[in-house]
Image: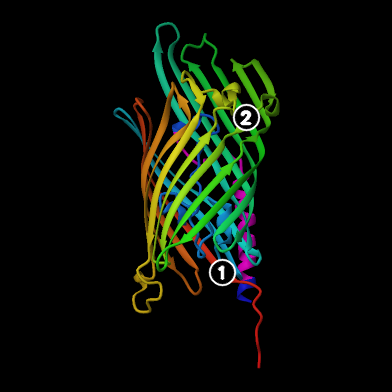
Amino acid sequence: MFGKKINLVLLSLFLTAAGVFAQTDGTYGGYSPYSVFGVGQLHQSGTSWNRGMGGVGIAARNNRFVNVLNPAAVTARDSLSFMSDFGLAGRMSIFSDGNKKNVNTLLNIDDFVISFPLWRHTAMMLGIRPISDVGYSITSSKIDPDSGKQTFVSAGNGGLYQFFAGAGVTFWNRLSLGAQFNYNFGNISKDAGTSYAESSYRNFQSGDSLRVSSLGVKFGLQYAQKLAGKSALTLGATYQLASKMNGQSVHYTEKGSYDRQRSVIELKDKNLRLGSELGIGLSYSLGDKFFAEFDYTRTDWSSSNLDQVIGFSNSGDAVFAPSVGQSFRLGAEFTPNRSDIRYYLRRCTYRAGAYFEQSYYTVGGNPVNTAGITLGVTLPVFRWYNGISLGIDIGQRGLGGASVKENYFGFNVGFNVFDIWFQKRAYE
């Protein structure tokens, strides 16, 4: 009965999450002036468990949490276990440009994933998560000798999301292979306009409405080598193929009240692509007491052709160009004593991590760099491996040589649900 109630609750949450992700009502999924470029600011992958360790997970195998970063990791589980993760994330960002400062706060549903066994050494996971966030509102003004005061306004919102289904299999209790199929979709709206104080000048406005979809696939592997005692090394790797983008880009321009033009571009005709991604990770574990990992990820958007469609490349005077991005991540977790019956805090798992990222595009030839540190903890709840994972993320984002800097403080909450399926009761 307990398991059936959990399953009904999880189904409701999954449908709710799908509905929220599909909204295009103008609300922000993320907020940053740097999301004006391309498909927006790429969302950090992983659940609260991954994020508490700097976002690592390519080489992680843990039977208590769903690891969405590598489809091969789905087989790291108890044989009859059903697992789920539902996350919320918030962020407070402080933007500074010289003496000017602006503050923005957000709270959104982050991800939802369920995982269950298929047959012996095989398992599967299903979920939905954000890929990128677009959210910004920029206003500037200047005085022109002829037209008087000119006010420029640029705003955008939306983002891309992903339904995914992955499965994995383990051979010889060492080698795990996995594959994941993705359906990426979303809507992005970008508008810009210039208004004049002098009435003899006509106001100008332009904008783009983008509807995007694509199908993609991701492969993963993990190889675990036991060492002395309970220690082990695990090597992990993932590769996500570039995926062709379908959909439409609607561009409009408006001068004054009557001169309005509209054009429609079919994205498939422009050979647009979401970039490919290669990830490599190495981890060390000591039983269920200590775990540490280092990950390197390389994303290649250089052939995405985003700079060929105005809806993705339109960024004012800045020279936008898709490029090759990369990230370096380091994280660890420690559990004092999972079996301690006297002190609750000794049963909790504590995490820390750090990361450095370079964006998948350049502006004026320079990438946007992001660096941060993370802290996290999982609080055990009820029986089995149920728990609540909490994490914080403190970092800075900025374009090299630019005066605009983004300092942020993020937090995330993950609800980890664990249950046992297909139990047969024995009666005497």
Residue ranking furthest to the top? 146
Write down the residue under mark 1. 78
Mark 1 / mark 2, whichever is N-terminal = 1
Q: Nearer the viewer, residue 172 or 258?
A: 172
Whether tag 1 and tag 2 are in contact, CB under 8 A, the answer is: no
User: In the rendered structure, does residue 8 fall within the stretch colored magenta?
Assistant: yes
Horizontal relation, residue 175 to residue 337: left or right: right
Q: Is residue 72 above or below residue 98?
A: below
Element type at mark 1? loop
Residue 386 in sight here: yes
Q: Quadrant of residue 427?
A: bottom right
Identify the residue at horizontal 60%, vertical 69% (top origin).
79
Magenta stretch: give its range: 5-32
Q: Nearer the viewer, residue 369 or 310?
A: 369
Q: Position of residue 261 (x, y in %)?
A: 66, 17
Q: Is residue 353 above or below residue 246?
A: below
The C terminus, quarter of image = bottom right
Q: Quadrant of residue 254?
A: top right
Identify the residue at horizontal 61%, vertical 18% (top origin).
253
> What's the coloring here?
rainbow
Q: Amino acid at mark 2?
A: Ser
Element type at mark 2? strand
Write down the residue under mark 2. 209
The tag on residue 190 is none
The tally of labels here is 2
